[in-house]
Amino acid sequence: MENGHPLRIIASGRGFQPVLEDHAGTPLRIIHIPVDADYRADVAATRKAISRDTIVIAGSAPSFPHGIIDPIEELSELARANGVGFHTDACLGGFVLPWAKRLGYDIPPFDFRLPGVTSISADTHKYGYAPKGTSVILYRGRELRHYQYFKATDWPGGLYFSPTLAGSRPGALSAACWAAMVAIGEKGYLQATEKILKTAAEIRRGIADIPDLYVLGDPLWVIAFGSKTLDIYSIMDQMTRRKWSLNGLHKPQCVHICVTLRHTLPGIAQRFVDDLKSSAAYVRQNPQGKGGMAPMYGMAATIPDRSMVADLLDMYIDLLYEV
Ligand SMILES: Cc1ncc(COP(=O)(O)O)c(C=O)c1O
């Protein structure tokens, strides 16, 4: 800790706020910077947030809420110019963007081709089609990788060392992950990505054509949409009744669909758009609808004390255990 201040991690405004500390137990503080009108991390605000305590800047390729790729090139250059690390969170995009680029989509560089990028995460358990519990973190060089090792040299149980932060890991998961990747192969990933991006474009066009709805930013396959006139959470509830499981988001209030291979089956995209059209029409005619998740999301959006919202979520999870 320099100057008695916690060290800083700078990330765009949609991140979590976990309690973190470095190897020496120094607390790490996350500074969330806002996103711009296109839902991309604000580079100017990032520049302003950098101080002598900053150790790393992070950006998403793309972000979970709105599926938008941050300006990784500018952000990582900023990190390099200030002598700090830059992490690309490609958990969602790591197994889509490289194939999308090969398919001819205009994908900006987000990886080690950019000299400022020092680490990248990519979830094999998402678009790598491997089991949950597997993921990849890549470092620019061995020196950085050393920080994830755990070593206990004075323990009576022997010399304990573990290559990952999470400690011992099941080998079966890694084997299953490897098997999935080898079985799918480059051809399989390319085909899957092509189908997903085409289907997502169809869904995006369909959403944009529905009166009262708008798409947030310029996404590829995670499409967030909101409404300036209708209660978007009531629309989400109507979609739930039609068997769609969508994620409710807030700040701003919206909902997203993360298009996966399942959605690329014949007729599914059209069914989604038709169901969304009829859900919006229903809410237009019944603006005071009750039940579902809409009241909870609506209320959570209006409570300024976020610890109260966290308490409400505890109560909600308690109920799930007790029913
Ligand atoms: C961009 C991004 N980063 C990180 C995560 C965390 O993923 P997990 O904890 O499932 O590995 C997610 C999950 O959806 C994500 O979308």
Image (cartoon, grey):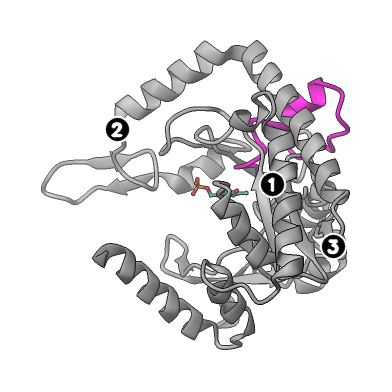
Residue that badge 2 annotates: 170
Marks 3, 2: nearer the viewer: 3
The image quadrant that residue 58 belongs to is bottom right
Give the magenta part as a residue range.
Answer: 86-112
Q: For the point 76% across and 62% down, which residue is it?
A: 226
Point out which mark residue 275 bears.
1
Q: Where is 101 relative to 75, above or below?
A: above
Residue 276 picture location, percent across and down: 72, 50
Say whether residue 105 is magenta. Answer: yes
Q: Main secondary structure of the magenta part?
A: loop
* 198 on left or right of 119: right
Q: In the rendered structure, are the residues bearing label 3 and label 2 in contact, judged by CB atoms less than 8 Å apart?
A: no
Residue 3: tell me if it is visible.
Answer: yes
Farthest left residue in view: 156
Q: Earlier in the sequence, mark 1 or mark 3?
A: 3
Q: For the point 76% across and 72% down, which residue is it?
A: 49
Residue 168 picture location, percent across and down: 28, 39
Q: Earlier in the sequence, mark 3 or mark 2?
A: 2
Residue 86: tell me if it is visible.
Answer: no
